[in-house]
Image: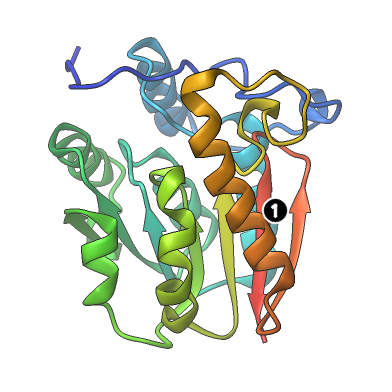
Amino acid sequence: MTEFDYAHKNTENGERATKTAPFNKPQIGEEIQVLRQNAFKAEIPVSDDETLCFLQTFLSTIKPQNILELGTAVGVSGAVMLKTCTGAHLTTVERDENFYKAAVENFKSLDLADRVTAILGDAGEVIEGLPENAFDFIFLDSAKVQYIKYLPRLKKLLKSGGVLVADDVLLFGYITGEEEVPKKRKMLVEHIKEYITAVTNDKELYTTVLDAGNGIAISVKK
C-alpha cells in the first residue's frame, strides 16, 4: 500500500452522522468501490456515501460539460462525476504528489484519462491561471481554511448559471454546535463560518447549505 505524507480521517462510515445517511447510497461500479475501499484502509480522504450520492443525483440533473475539482485525492470523486456526466471534461487539482500520481493511475485504469486534465500544484496558484467563465460546475474539496480565500476567483471561473459546491462546510458538527470544537480547530471553524456567511450573503449567488454528509454548500452564479 502506498504511504502518504500526512494523516487522514477514515471516512468509510461517513464523516458525520446524519439522519439521512442510511438512505443515501451512491450507485458506483465495482472498480470505483475497490478504489474507495483501498483509500479507506489507508485513511485517505475520499468522499463518503452521502456526498457521492448527492454528486450523482445533482450532476445527473444539471449535466455540466466542464467540471473543476479542487482536491483530487486519489480520484474517486472525480471518477464518479465523470461516470455520471459521460460527456464532461474534468480539470482536477491536487497538491500532494503521491495522491496526484495515484489519481492519474486510477483515471487510466477506469478508462477516463482522456477526459481528465490532472494538475499537480497548489490550488490557489492554479486557479489564477485558469480561464474565466469556463466551468459549469466546481467541486471545492481542498484545504478548508482556504475556501474563503478562493471564493472571489472561483466566482470568476464559473459561467453564469454555473454551480459551486463546497464540501465539508459543517465540519464534523463543529459548525452547528453538535460537537465541541477542539482548540486546534477553532481557527479553521472561524474560516468555514466566514465562507458560509460570504456565500449566503453574496448578491451574485443563490446559496443553500445542506445537512448531508459533512455539510454541503451549493452556490449558483446568477
In the structure shown, which secondary structural element does the residue marked by tag 1 occupy?
helix
Q: In the picture shown, does residue 64 fall above or below 93?
A: below
Q: Is residue 60 visible?
A: no
Could you tell me if residue 152 is visible in this image?
yes
Percent position of residue 136, x then y:
51, 77
Q: Position of residue 52 (x, y in %)?
A: 59, 41
Where is 150 relative to 204, above or below? above
Left or right for 41, reference 109: right
Picture layout, residue 86 above or below residue 97? below
Rendered residue at 44%/56% (across/down):
82
Quarter of the image with the N terminus is top left
- Residue at 62% in and 61% down: 59
Return the residue at label 1.
57
The answer to which of 16 and 146 lies nearer the viewer is 146
Residue drawn at (17%, 15%) of the image:
3
* Quarter where residue 127 is shown: bottom left
Residue 186's spot in the image, x, y percent? 54, 30
Residue at 66 percent across and 56 percent down: it is: 196
Front-lying residue, 95 or 77: 95
